[in-house]
Amino acid sequence: MSSSPPSFLSPKTLAQAIGVSESSVKRWADDGRIRIQKTSGGHRRIPVAEAARFVREQGIVLVEPERLGLVIPPEFERAEEPIEAALRRGASLELQNLLTSRYLAGEPLAGLFDGPMAAALRQIGELWRKDPRGIFLEHRACAAARDALVALARLIPSPTAGAPTAVGGAISGDTSQLPSMMVSMVLANEGLRAVDLGPDSPAVALIHAAEAESARLVWVSINHMPDESAGRAELRDLAAGLGERKLVIGGATADRLQVASTTLRIQTMAELAAFGAGLAS
Ligand code: B12
């Protein structure tokens, strides 16, 4: 990744980004409308995720987004499908800027994932059929997406003390990384503490994680399914090993594996966000 947004902003930087005076930002900080931290020298510092929350909730239009580390090159603003264009070029910084600015403008995170991100990856996944460079372009796009998601995740507010925990990952043999990352970010954005074990996470690992983290919810992302009967058996073991904890599954090939009636099949990130919000409230 070539660059990432700062972790903390000064009141002056946030003021410049949103086009107000520094004293206004300081006043909002002192009123508690913006939660701040203080340096040992007594200076106010605003965690970038807190600035993101404030901008989203107030519906503020950023006048100088580059102050938050958002530099959007004009050619990407003009492109017809800018997210797909950035992914095709493996341009993680541009992708990060596009996702971050849309998130800060108040778009639901789940909508960005269900919509432009999933659509673009579907298109890119078809390139190998007619382009000998297709596999390279797909792998590079995935790497760019991963870096941009890591950067975007830094804007999601930290969970409050006592927030319910969710753990999850992609099922055994499934090398996908992005869907499970997105699940963890969507749940975190709804106020849960989310622990993503990543690709190829067997049932036994998920059960141990759920116990260690006292998780209320376990998710399994099922996208590539090398062996369906093994997958079915694994989900059965998982459902049995989790006892009272909630188990949700999702992903492109999840329908082939649904087993226990207590397992909840969720289709989209938007539905997952609604489910997570219910759990967090
Ligand atoms: C990226 C990708 C890969 C990458 C993964 C890299 C990585 N680091 O993540 C790599 C290159 C490794 C790969 C490899 C392969 N892939 Co692949 N891949 C894709 C691709 C292009 C995008 C998948 C993705 O990340 N999408 C982004 C996510 C966010 O979107 P989504 O998958 O649509 O998921 C949505 C919902 O399902 C839901 N969701 C997803 N997960 C979850 C989880 C929960 C809990 C919930 C609630 C919701 C949810 O939300 C998402 C957003 O709406 C798809 C194309 C496609 N049509 O999906 C093929 C695709 C999944 N791959 C496919 C295939 C065949 C393969 C290979 C077998 C190819 C090969 N011959 O080697 C290998 C298998 C590797 C393995 N054993 O795991 C097929 C699967 C077909 C099938 N039905 O089984 C697909 C569908 C392509 C196709 N049209 O043929 N792949």
Image (cartoon, grey):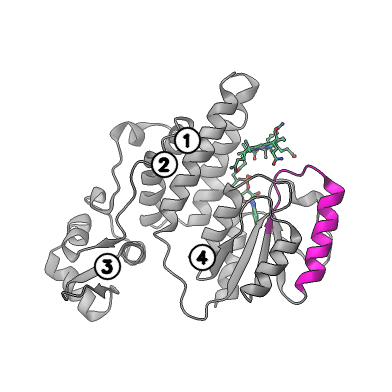
Q: Is residue 23 above or below residue 197?
A: below
The residue sitting at 57% across, 47% down in the picture is 178
CA separation, marks 2 and 3? 24 Å
Quadrant housing residue 155: bottom left
Question: Tag 4: residue type?
Answer: Ala
Quadrant housing residue 123: top right
Secondary element type, mark 4: helix
Residue 215 shows up from this direction:
no
The residue sitting at 61% across, 68% down in the picture is 166
Q: Which mark is residue 188?
A: 4
Q: Quadrant of the C terminus?
A: bottom right
Left or right of 114 on screen, residue 235: right
Percent across and percent down for residue 168 are: 64, 61
CA separation, marks 1 and 4? 24 Å
- Please state the extent of the stretch shown in magenta in the rendering: 220-242
Question: Tag 1: residue type?
Answer: Leu
Q: Is residue 111 above or below residue 80?
A: below
Percent across and percent down for residue 139 are: 56, 34
Secondary element type, mark 2: helix
Q: Which residue is mark 3?
A: 46
Q: Which mark is residue 110?
A: none
The kind of secondary structure the magenta stretch mainly shows is helix
In which quadrant of this rendering is ligand 1 seen? top right
Secondary element type, mark 1: helix
Question: Tag 2: residue type?
Answer: Leu
Q: Is residue 83 above or below residue 169?
A: above
> Which numbered disc, 4 or 3, marks the residue that appears first in the sequence?
3
Q: Which residue is mark 1?
A: 87
Secondary element type, mark 3: strand
Q: Are marks 4 and 2 in contact (CB under 8 Å)?
A: no
CA separation, marks 1 and 3? 31 Å
Q: Nearer the viewer, residue 107 or 198?
A: 198
